[in-house]
Image (tube, rainbow, N blue to C red):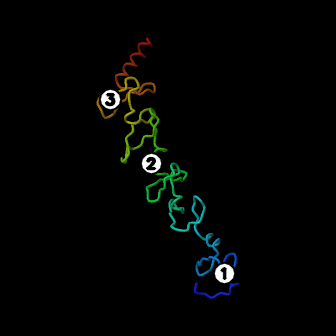
Amino acid sequence: MDQVYHIRCFTCSVCNRQLSGLAFYALAGRPYCESDYLNTLEKCCVCNRPILDRILRATGKPYHAECFTCTVCGKGLEGIPFTVDNANRIHCIEDFTKKFAPRCSVCHKPIVPEPNQPNTVRAVALDRNFHVSCYKCEDCGLLLSSQAEGRGCYPLDDHILCQNCNARRVRQLTASAC
């Protein structure tokens, strides 16, 4: 520190502990014992330990690189795209999508993009979500699509039906009402 001290005068700037023969740190031209120096360092928001090397910052908070992980799978996220939920918890994109994606009302799995695909398509009918492959007539199993002629959805009494099965059910209801 380019200074000369008496042994009894060479003390920690915070706790006044004598530093002769001990490890010490210089900060702003003042000596610190190891404990008080560590207290000056930024602390990781996950483990609350001082960050001695590189500080990784995300969402305005400091992290050790090894503490910056997905809250679901624990995968390290340094240098990898990530996102946060409304409680500011960190997620890898894959787990965030699985956790918060709409679920198919038939198979109950999340409706997420296929691997290496940026987007996915979902069908919505009667305020319910469907994978395109699960969007079928409940009676005959015909794959429904608003894009294909004659394969639209004709809901009846909260049931997803094709045009033919809808007409058949309406005839049955009309016949039983007579």
Q: Residue 104's x, y, as percent?
A: 44, 36
- Would you say 4 lies left or right of 110 here? right
State the quadrant of the C terminus: top left
Residue furthest to the left in view is 149
Dot 2 falls on a residue whose secondary structure is: helix
Dot 1 falls on a residue whose secondary structure is: loop
Name the residue type under label 3: Arg
Position of 135 relative to 92 (above/below)? above
The alpha-carbon separation of the residues under discs 2 and 3 comes to 33 Å
Q: In the depicted view, which residue is nearer to us: 116 or 112?
A: 116
Residue at label 1? 20
Q: Are marks 2 and 3 in contact (CB under 8 Å)?
A: no
- Would you say 29 lies left or right of 92 here? right
Residue at label 2? 94
Pick whichever of labels 1 and 3 is earlier in the sequence: 1
Pick whichever of labels 1 and 2 is earlier in the sequence: 1
The alpha-carbon separation of the residues under discs 1 and 2 comes to 54 Å
For label 1, the crowd category at 10 Å Cα-Cα, with few meaning under 14, some 14 to 19 and many 20 or more, is: some
Dot 3 falls on a residue whose secondary structure is: loop
Name the residue type under label 2: Glu
